[in-house]
Amino acid sequence: MEFFKFIFTMLISFSPVLVSRAFLMNAPDRLYKEIVQPSFAPPGWAFGVVWTVLYFLIGISLFLFCTAEGDSSQKRMGFIFFGIQLLLNVAFMPICFGLRSFLGGLIICVLLAVFLILTIVQFFKISKISAYLLIPYLLWGLFAIILSYKVYILNP
């Protein structure tokens, strides 16, 4: 039973890239090469590497949170915040690259960071390890805000 929960949480954690790629195909890769980038922008291939690691950590975090004992109302709030940040994560690529809305992408990044912080706080109440595993995701999210802002400024 735990194995299936683990697989399920991994599928959930990787869902943003699966959904985005299914609808957008290679559009994000093409657009990323076409737009003016800030000097500190990582190469396109780095996103795949970083997100693979982050989605794996997110999946482990969610699994630990799901299987931890705790107050059901606290867990419910954790799931709600997690779900909102996951939906924002899914929305980023279609809005930023599908609609070519760099301002929309920036707004999504800021909202994502807010709900990720709320998720971390809520996860911490149930499983400290699950909260700590989300810290790299938050750091990447904060970097994404800076990068999105610069992309928005450089590509009016």
Image: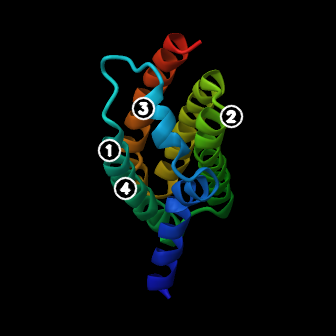
Residue that appears at 49% across and 19% down: 151
Identity of the amino acid at label 4? Answer: Thr
- Mark 2 and mark 1: Cα distance apart in space: 22 Å
Element type at marker 3? helix
| Numbered disc in front, either 1 or 3 | 3
Quarter of the image that includes the C terminus: top right
Residue neighbourhood size for the residue with mark 1, other residues' Cα within 10 Å, grouped as few (<14), some (14–19), many (≥20): few
**Image location of residue 58, percent across then percent down:** 44, 56
> Would you place residue 40 above or below residue 85 in this image?
above
> Would you place residue 127 above or below residue 154 in this image?
below
**Image location of residue 16, percent across then percent down:** 56, 54
Residue 118, image quadrant: top right
Residue that appears at 40% across and 21% down: 37
Identity of the amino acid at label 1? Answer: Trp
What residue is disc 3 on?
33
- Mark 2 and mark 3: Cα distance apart in space: 16 Å
What residue is disc 4 on?
52
What residue is disc 2 on?
99
Q: Mark 2 or mark 4, which is nearer the start of the sequence?
A: 4
Element type at marker 4? helix
- Mark 1 and mark 3: Cα distance apart in space: 11 Å
